[in-house]
Amino acid sequence: MTARPAAGCVERDPSSEISEPDIRAALDAYTLDSLRPISVTLALYYLVMALSHLLVLPPDIAPIMAAVAGFSVALALGLRFILSRWAIPARRAHAIMGGMVMLTLFNTLLHLYLVAEVRQTTNVMLVITAAGLLLLSDRWLIISIVAALGGWGLIVASLPPSEEWSHFAFAMFSSVMLSVIVHIVRVRTFRRLEYLRLQDVRQKQELEHRAVQMETSIGVGQRIITLLDLDTLLNQVAELIKERYGFYFVGIFLLDESRTQLVARAGTGEAGQTLREQGHRQPVGQGVIGAAAQQQQAVCVADVRADPRFVPNLAIPETRSELALPLLLGETLLGVLDISSDAIAAFREEDVPVLQLLADQVTIAIQNAFLYEGEKARRLLAETLYEVGRALSRTLDLEEVLDLILRQLTTLVPYDRAAVMLQNEETLEFVATRGFPAEIAIHHLRVSIKDQDVFQDIYETQRPLVIADVKARPDWQYVDGLTQTRAWLGVPLIRSGEVIGMLSLARLEPLAYSDEEINLTTAFAGQAALALENARLYDNITRFNQQLEGMVAERTEALQEAYSKLERLDRTKSDFIGVVSHELRTPLTVLQGYSQILLRDGDIKDNEYHLQMVSGIHSGAVRLHEIVNAMLDMVKIDSRSLQLSPEPLHLARVFARLRDRLADPLRERQLTLELALPDSLPPVTADREALEKLFDQLLINAIKYTPDGGRLTVTGQPHAEGVEVVVSDTGIGIDPAMQELIFTKFYQTGKVELHSSSKTKFKGGGPGLGLAIARGIVEAHGGRLWVESPGCDEETCPGSAFHVVLPLHPAIKEEG
């Protein structure tokens, strides 16, 4: 917004601040600085004059003049010593300079009198001219000239008449005029230069003042960006303005909900703290602050003692001038920025736009803080309701849930006492309370329902009821043993469209509940009604479960019999797989051997078509051989006949061999395999072939379900049970519901007919035995295998992590 003129501010020109006392003080300071070199110069001059008097003057005169000159040397050196040791007031400088001129004049007139030569008048003329040059004081110049003319006249009168005296009298008059002219020109020049210097100083001070204003504005802007807590923000902004400008007091007052009162929300120093603690309020339209709020424009008071609008405040008694700036957001008034000074007329008219800009930035800060606090309150409400909802889902204990509701509600809606009350015929029973005295047995508390009382009102309207002060309600029922309530809020508990009770909140002070607090309490009342409904449903479910238990008992025996049949069928299936696998290995070995011979045949190599066909036969035979081996491994695991030959193994070497073995599929899929196994990882005692098969299955599985360009990571660390190895990937992940099923035999994800024939292609197919074999090998070593994944998503690829825990020295049982 654009700052409008603030009546009462001082319109000040920096040049007008240069006053006559400032110029006079500068003249005094310059004269004082001149005394030091002049005193030394005079001492040297009179020292030379003393020697020359002894050499040149007649014997009867020489001792006298030499003595006077020596005395002058002593005075000049004494003055220099005093100036170097003590601080002489600047206002005394002209008198001292006049004294030095008078001393020189005395020496000159004495010399003229003793010599009695008319030519010595020239020395007097030089002293008069020098007085015009040295003295910057009109008074001392006049005194020097009068003394010179008077002394010269007396000497001339005592000497014999001569025609030359009239000539030198005219010369004396000329020297006086010259001295006056030199004095006037020098003083005027000095005053002009000093005026320009002071003006430059004032302009620099003005620029520095503007720089401070800009820095403060930038500082406030930075606080707007970094702070969102309203109280912290306002206090820091107020302190920043006070610190940068040096004001007596800076306060920020915001409108209350009624928009009729300005409440102190921030202030500097002890005064600000006192105003906040007292909850100081200023009615709109009263005082300087109230006038700014009412007029919605800046109000400046140059002297508060002469302004009838000023309202004295004991917290800031030294206030002499005041500037109140409205905090406007568009046409909406949020509050007032108040600035007080202990000096009269401390605010300039040109300061108002800059300070109003600061006020506008504070307004933006307040609005941002309001938005943040609103969002924070909504988030806190959502989190609180979520916590209550979780409590409702994990427990059906009515008392526990209702107590949680009342406890969480106090963080959002301040109250002194709260209760959940249910209707039981013609009374209200307390089923949960908070803030009640410990000696009161709440379960025995009853409140009668009467016609036209507060509950009857809530029951009929099914809406919350707010009472600002219960003393205004003649039908209010007081409970024995409880502190008298003042402000009260009742919210209906509605179930299936019917009021079954109410949520009661009481305050001991007559501070009415706001609309926002009513809405929050209504939301919690809904949770309380839900808890009551859940308790009723739980009672029904309990009776229904008792009926189901009888039916389940009848079916248990049938299920056990069916399980035994399935177990026998599973053993038969395993036996069949074992027989078929053994029978398939012989022809597969022949097929694999002959295909290798053909691949090495020169004619086949030269024929690309035949080479491709033979390569396909060979790769198919190898793949089929791997499947048959996997089936045999599964049969051995199921029958607990897996043969293990344990030996000390370094896992880093095992994974290095596996990385070399999987180099081609990793390169084809553009996958990165990172091994992060520390050298300090201890070796494990395990079967080398089985361990390589275990981790090979995990790596193949990670390759299969990781999109091209992904990353596989193997990490290891000591574990309380031995060593833990984690194989993680950036793949599509695993649904939590399937994270245990994937370790069962023949389990496959997705549609089988859509799987590819390669075990390393993305989502490639297989017999579904790899992870089952991996778990069997881990368990055969006495370890554990499980998977962790946030879920399955082919777009975001949350990844999976397979954890393997192996003991360092397992007790392996070899069964045949």
Image (cartoon, helix red, strand yellow):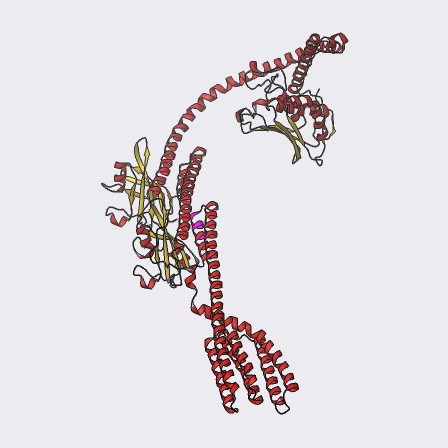
Identify the image quadrant of residue 312: bottom left
Residue 639, percent from left and from top: 65, 19
Q: Is residue 406 left or right of residue 183?
A: left
Count of marks placed on residues? 0
Vertical comparison of 193 with 78: above or below: above
Viewer-proximal residue among 162 and 199 = 162
Residue 347, percent from left and from top: 39, 58
Residue 38, percent from left and from top: 57, 75
Q: Is residue 514 left or right of residue 767?
A: left
Residue 585 visible in this rendered orientation of the protein: yes
Q: Quadrant of the C terminus?
A: top right
Q: Is residue 23 left or right of residue 84?
A: left
Vertical comparison of 415 with 246: above or below: above
Q: Is residue 233 magenta?
A: yes
Q: Main secondary structure of the magenta part?
A: helix
Viewer-proximal residue among 1 and 596 = 1
Identify the image quadrant of residue 66: bottom right
Q: Is residue 180 left or right of residue 462?
A: right
Viewer-proximal residue among 5 and 245 = 5
Q: Is residue 275 magenta?
A: no
Viewer-proximal residue among 673 and 561 = 673
Vertical comparison of 263 with 563: above or below: below
Residue 440 visible in this rendered orientation of the protein: no
- In magenta, the rendered stretch is 227-236
Residue drawn at 26 percent across, 41 percent down: 449
Residue 46, percent from left and from top: 61, 81
